[in-house]
Image: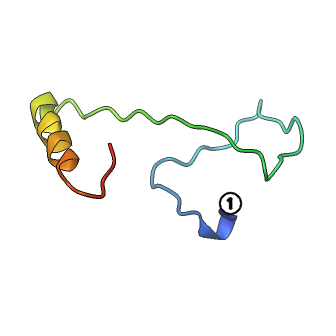
Amino acid sequence: MSSQKNLIPISGTETAVRSRDRVIGEVDPNERIEVTVRVRPKPSGPGIAALEKLVMKLGACPGIPL
């Protein structure tokens, strides 16, 4: 498990505490959670064809599991 000192914030992802937010209980530091992150390309980005080409290139690299 990583500790707070090992975490590196990603710029622009900080969320302010809202007035309706509240603590509902203690957090179990040993509890495992699973998170799925979906990243969409920017509308002005490389497009699907370029992304497919990159995925194929990464798939050809040894040591990089897909």
Alpha-carbon neighbours of circle 1 within 10 Å: few (<14), some, or many (≥20)? few
Residue situated furthest right in the rendering = 25
Colour setting: rainbow
- Residue at image coords 58%, 63%: 7
Residue sitting at x 63%, y 44%: 16
> What amino acid is labelled 1 in the image?
Met
Count of all numbered marks drawn on residues in the image = 1
> Residue at 30% of width from left, 53% of height from top?
64
Residue at horizontal 87%, vertical 35%?
Answer: 24
The spot of residue 15 in percent (x, y) is 59, 44
Secondary structure beneath label 1: loop
Q: Is residue 13 above or below residue 3?
A: above
Which quadrant holds residue 40?
A: top left
Compare residues 42 and 3 and report the one nearer the observer.
3
User: What residue is shown with label 1?
Assistant: 1
Q: Is residue 51 above or below residue 8?
A: above
Say whether residue 6 is left or right of residue 36: right
Residue 1 in the image, given as x and y percentages of width and height: 68, 60
Q: Is 22 displayed left or right of 65 in the figure?
A: right
Q: Locate residue 27 relative to residue 52 in the image: left or right.
A: right
Is residue 45 something one can see in this rendering? Answer: no
The residue lying furthest to the front in this view is: 62
Furthest toward the bottom, the residue is 5
Residue 55 location (% of width, % of height): 20, 41
| Residue 35 seen | yes
- State which quadrant residue 54 falls in: top left
Q: Please identify the quadrant where the C terminus is shown.
A: top left
**Relative depth, front residue between 62 and 53:** 62
Give the left or right position of residue 20, taking residue 53 as reference.
Answer: right
List x then y, in percent, for residue 60. Answer: 17, 49
Task: Pick the residue in front: 44 or 38.
Answer: 38
